[in-house]
Image (cartoon, helix red, strand yellow):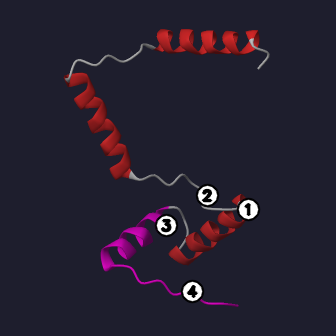
């Protein structure tokens, strides 16, 4: 059997231990579950996001709106999609 060692700060370790204990397991078991899920999934078994990228997108949207830009409603978006699909069908696409 192999051993994996990971260095993390004390507060993260304590918080993780507390969380996993509340779920009825220790941190080692949680890590084994994560590794098994990653192998079953064929990658990281949850979505990874770049919050700074999302923050930039939101800030750009706020600035766009402040500058007088308008956003489509859900109905306008659906109408655009239906029109695009119809045009694609007319051209044999």
Q: Earlier in the sequence, mark 3 or mark 4?
A: 4
Q: Residue 40 carries which label?
A: 1
Q: Which residue is drawn at 55% across and 65% down?
A: 24
Q: Which of marks 4 and 2 is nearer the N terminus?
A: 4
Q: Which of marks 1 and 3 is in front?
A: 1
Q: Which of marks 3 and 2 is nearer the N terminus?
A: 3
- In the displayed structure, 68 sits above or below 50; it is above
What distance separates the C-alpha of mark 2 from that of mark 1? 9 Å
Residue 58: x and y in percent read 31, 36
Q: Name the residue under label 2.
A: 45
- In the displayed structure, 82 sits above or below 46; it is above
What distance separates the C-alpha of mark 1 from that of mark 3? 21 Å
Which secondary structure lies at badge 3?
helix
The reply to whether the C-beta atoms of the residues labelled 1 and 3 are less than 8 Å apart is: no
Q: Name the residue under label 4.
A: 4
**Left or right of 79: which side holds 41?**
right
What distance separates the C-alpha of mark 4 from that of mark 2? 19 Å
Residue 86: x and y in percent read 69, 9
What distance separates the C-alpha of mark 4 from that of mark 1? 19 Å
Q: Decide: few, some or many residues near mark 3? Use Cα within 10 Å; few <14, some 14-19, many ≥20.
A: some
Task: Depth check: give the residue in front, 32 or 38.
Answer: 38
The reply to whether the C-beta atoms of the residues labelled 2 and 1 are less than 8 Å apart is: yes
Q: Name the residue under label 3.
A: 20
What distance separates the C-alpha of mark 3 from that of mark 2? 18 Å
Q: Number of labelled discs?
A: 4
Residue 57 is a magenta residue: no
Q: Residue at x 57, y 54 (%)?
A: 46
**Chain part drawn in magenta:** 1-22
**Left or right of 6: which side holds 39?**
right
Place residue 7 in its image quadrant: bottom left
């Amino acid at each position: 059997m192999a051993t994996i060692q990971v260095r993390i700060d004390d507060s993260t370790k304590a918080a993780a231990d507390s969380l996993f204990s509340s779920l009825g397991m220790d941190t080692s078991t949680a890590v084994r579950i994560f590794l098994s899920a990653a192998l079953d999934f064929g990658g990281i078994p949850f979505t990874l996001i770049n919050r700074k990228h999302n923050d930039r997108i939101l800030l750009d949207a706020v600035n766009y709106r402040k500058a007088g830009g308008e956003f489509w409603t859900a109905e306008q978006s659906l109408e655009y999609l239906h029109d695009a699909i119809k045009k694609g069908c007319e051209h044999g696409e």
